[in-house]
Amino acid sequence: MKYRKFGKLDWKASVLGFGCMRLPLIDDDYSKIDEPEATKMIHYAIDNGINYLDTAYNYHQGNSEVFLGKALQNGYREKVKLATKLLPIEVKQYEDFDKLLNEQLEKLQTDYVDFYLLHGINRRWFPKLRDLGVLKWAEGAIEDGRIKHLGFSFHDELDIFKKIVDSYENWTFCQILYNYMSSEYQAGTLGLKYAAAKGLAVVIMSPLLGSWLAKAPQAVQDIWDTAPVKRTSAEWGLQWLWNQPEVSVVLSGMSTMEVVQENINSAKTSAIGKLTKEELAIINKAREVYHRLREIPCNSCGYCMDCPNGVDIPYNFKLFNEGSMYENVQRARGWYRFMVDGYEGDYHREKGQAVKCTQCRECELKCPQNIAISEWMPIVHQVLGERKSYDDFPKPKQLVPKR
């Protein structure tokens, strides 16, 4: 296993961390972890050098922490740093901070967590937690030993990320969504470098875009096949991250022993600056091919927003495109459904599904790509909301809207 310095701490983290959000299941029920198999995977990972485990209050409907508490018995707890997260929606008053942390410690069967994150914070949740006194409370929990280090996981835009980083001088680390297809999304590369320059360790989530990059469509596989060094699609994604000096830990939500073994073997070969100019160019070509596979030529510039009917136009297009690009429409449909069923205040899901479009065409006047947004929106909903095929509809042409 390879290790890297974790921000300003006098400690090195394994470059591969085990994310306990996608553990093996019983009967495809997300709440039912296959504990014997998951325990084998966790023990194998730790025995082979992984020393950073990540979970959260809500993973596996609250059962991930319970499982880890069992799996880390018999000396395994002492071999790892354990990260878990405070779920903002569970906080209604100051006293809830203690209540939630103590519940988590009990589930995890430990007296302390090494790394505690404010989970999924954004322009709404961070001010709420801050105003309730979360930073003062966390300093008290650090003083009494229940928390060793404080950080946050993030889902919002770059300017919000920078403000949160700068709002508190005692952050130890942050966790961001980052991969070669999302280098300009949310915090992105600029956020990665910004946090690292401030001395924060940066933990990467969604390194393979929630598994969308784990298996390449044939057009992208043809690009990988031109490389002098042969790697799987997943390896290309992981090695691109490990190539960057600002990346501290790459989290992988691993569901099978095979994936655990493959990722550990890949981590062992990683290094900062390892990829050649030719290999980085190949990754850029793969990215270009993925973008050419987009159904809708939207680049998420946001000029179409805000929609008077509350439609999150770029996000709807993003899901529709990703379902096609990565040949995984089921996953896109799940995220589309989550725009309605997701928890209150989540940044993207505050805004609406494509079905809310009334074809007023105000957005089309603002779109620099001249996308026929009002014609695409019913198709987006029919594919993602009503589960029809991408091929059921003639594709609208790009056009300058007539008024």
Image: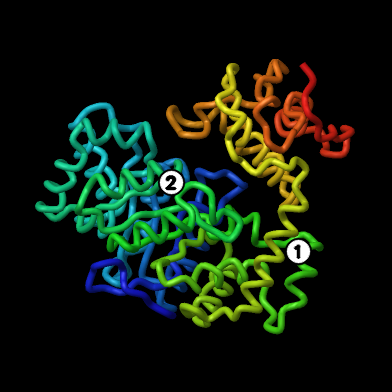
Identify the image quadrant of residue 222: bottom right
Neighbour class for label 1 at 10 Å: few (<14), some, many (≥20)?
Answer: many
- Residue at the spot of label 2: 158
Q: Where is residue 254 in the image (x, y as percent from the top left)?
A: 53, 61
* Type of the residue with mark 1: Val
In front here: 244 or 119?
A: 244
Mark number, residue 229: none
Q: Where is residue 270 in the image (x, y as percent from the top left)?
A: 50, 79
Q: CA–CA distance between discs 2 and 1?
A: 29 Å
Task: Tell me the quadrant of the picture where the C terminus can be found.
Answer: top right
Vertical relation: 176 (above or below) 163: below
* Type of the residue with mark 2: Leu
- Residue at the spot of label 1: 220
Taking the spot 48% from the left edge, 54% from the top edge, the residue there is: 188
Q: How many labels does the image show?
A: 2
Discs 2, 1 touching: Cβ within 8 Å:
no
Q: Position of residue 144 (x, y in %)?
A: 10, 52
In front here: 362 or 17?
A: 362
Q: Position of residue 88 (x, y in %)?
A: 34, 36
User: In terms of sequence position, does the residue under pointer 2 or pointer 1 come before the other?
Assistant: 2
Vertical relation: 100 (above or below) 231: above
Identify the image quadrant of residue 386: top right
* Mark 1: secondary structure: helix
Taking the spot 70% from the left edge, 62% from the top edge, the residue there is: 215
Vertical relation: 269 (above or below) 87: below
Q: In this view, does 70 lie to the left or right of 346?
A: left
Q: Is residue 325 left or right of residue 48?
A: right
Taking the spot 59% from the left edge, 40% from the top edge, the residue there is: 301
* Mark 2: secondary structure: helix
Task: Tell me the quadrant of the picture where the N terminus can be found.
Answer: bottom left
Vertical relation: 63 (above or below) 203: above
